[in-house]
Image (cartoon, grey):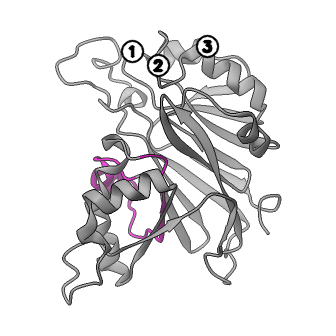
Amino acid sequence: MTGSLVPAVSDHLELTILGCGSSSGSPAIGCHCPTCASDNPKNTRSRCSAYVRLGEQALVIDTGPDLRQQALREGLSRIDAVLYTHPHADHLNGIDDLRAFCYVKKGPITLYGNAFTLDNIRSRFHYALMPPSPVWDKPVLVLEEVAQRFDFHGVAVTPIPLQHGKWPCLGWRIGNVAWLTDLSHIPDDSLALLEGLDVLFLDCLRHDPYPSHLGVQQSFEWAQRIAARRTILIHMTHQLEYRALTAECPPGIEVGYDGLTIRVPLSAGAE
């Protein structure tokens, strides 16, 4: 499968964390814990997603319910495709906000995912899979089921099968950057797809164990096994305060925050 024969213009991948929070976000409604009451902007976390720029092309990973505010905050006006991890509401329910991006470019947006996620989108958002109207009054989306690495404008994109409790979730590797959110286990075959990473974004829900997510110590252990040059923790609840968690992190692991942007050379990941 190919995205286009046009190569990425830049030799760098740029990824911005749009949100690194859990399904409740931080501050959580009605809570006055140290994280929620904090004046540190790095403790303000919207729902988990990322924006990836590849030259003139742009991807998002998931469309959570905060997508509109995230796009306005970061000054985004272009999305060419979405990489979906799974259909939980905090990763999917901002899909209607793709309408604005379709309107701006007067063209459709391609959604990549596994059959489990795309079937959910067909069932719930079928109206977004129709041809455009003259006024572009709804999203115009095209579904592409993927199970193996494909080329997107000259850059290798690899779906990474993960287990999210009982759900089949996907992580995504783009060049030498991987985004693994909402997981409880990484199969051995998927670990092999994560070798040689420059940057790993990794699920880290809270200190206490949770059936469908990684806890702090589990995140540290998986980070050590994957051995990326740099690991950034994402999908955190308000139970994890930024400075306190930073103090716990071993070398090579850091705490993510909304708006954090990284730039990584594409040479090793490009085709």
Query: 232 or 243, which lies in front?
Result: 232
Q: Is residue 220 magenta?
A: no
Mark in the foreground, 2 or 3 = 2
For marks 2 and 3 on the same chain, the one whose residue lies earlier in the sequence: 2
Relative to 253, 40 lies left or right: left
Residue 119's image quarter? bottom left
> Which quadrant, please, contains the C terminus?
bottom right
Mark in the foreground, 3 or 1 = 3
Residue occupying image coordinates x 38% and y 45%: 91
Residue occupying image coordinates x 52% and y 55%: 114
Relative to 151, 227 lies left or right: right
Contact, mark 1 vs mark 2 (Cβ under 8 Å): no
The amino acid type, in three-letter code, at marker 2 is Pro
- The residue beneath circle 2 is 211
Q: What element carries label 3?
A: helix
Q: What element carries label 1?
A: loop
